[in-house]
Image: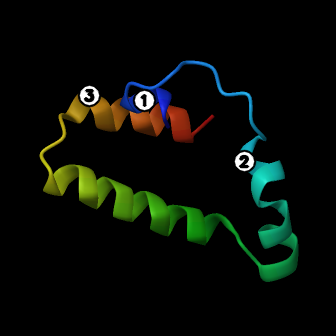
Amino acid sequence: MTYAFGGPEEYHGKDMWKAHEKLARGQGLNDNHFNIIVKHLVGALQKFNVPEVIFQKQSQMCSR
């Protein structure tokens, strides 16, 4: 997502699963939680009139 908002193209950290594995296995983090976060992110982008093209980039990055 950093890239979608103009940050560096390369990310060298953990992938999403590895970064959140303890939450997923131990505390039940699941797709529903992810969808709620995306809903709030989109709401924030809309509130601050972020151009639609940014929504598209963000969506592409999240679906990878």
How far apart are the alpha carbons under marks 3 and 1?
10 Å
Q: Is residue 27 left or right of residue 57?
A: right
Amino acid on which the number 1 mark rests in the picture: Ala
Identify whether 43 is placed above or below 62.
below
Quarter where residue 15 is shown: top right
Amino acid on which the number 2 mark rests in the picture: Met
Disc sitting over residue 4 in the figure: 1
Q: Are marks 3 and 1 in contact (CB under 8 Å)?
A: no
How far apart are the alpha carbons under marks 3 and 2?
24 Å
Label 3 crowd (10 A; few <14 / some 14-19 / many >=20)? few
Q: Nearer the viewer, mark 3 or mark 1?
A: 1
Amino acid on which the number 3 mark rests in the picture: Val
> Disc 2 on helix, strand or loop?
helix
> Disc 3 on helix, strand or loop?
helix
Q: Is residue 7 left or right of residue 53?
A: right
Label 2 crowd (10 A; few <14 / some 14-19 / many >=20)? few
Label 1 crowd (10 A; few <14 / some 14-19 / many >=20)? some
The disc, 3 or 1, on the residue closer to the chain's N-terminal end is 1
> Disc 1 on helix, strand or loop?
helix
The disc, 2 or 1, on the residue closer to the chain's N-terminal end is 1
Residue assigned mark 2: 16
Report x, y in % for residue 24: 79, 69
Q: Is residue 17 left or right of residue 6?
A: right
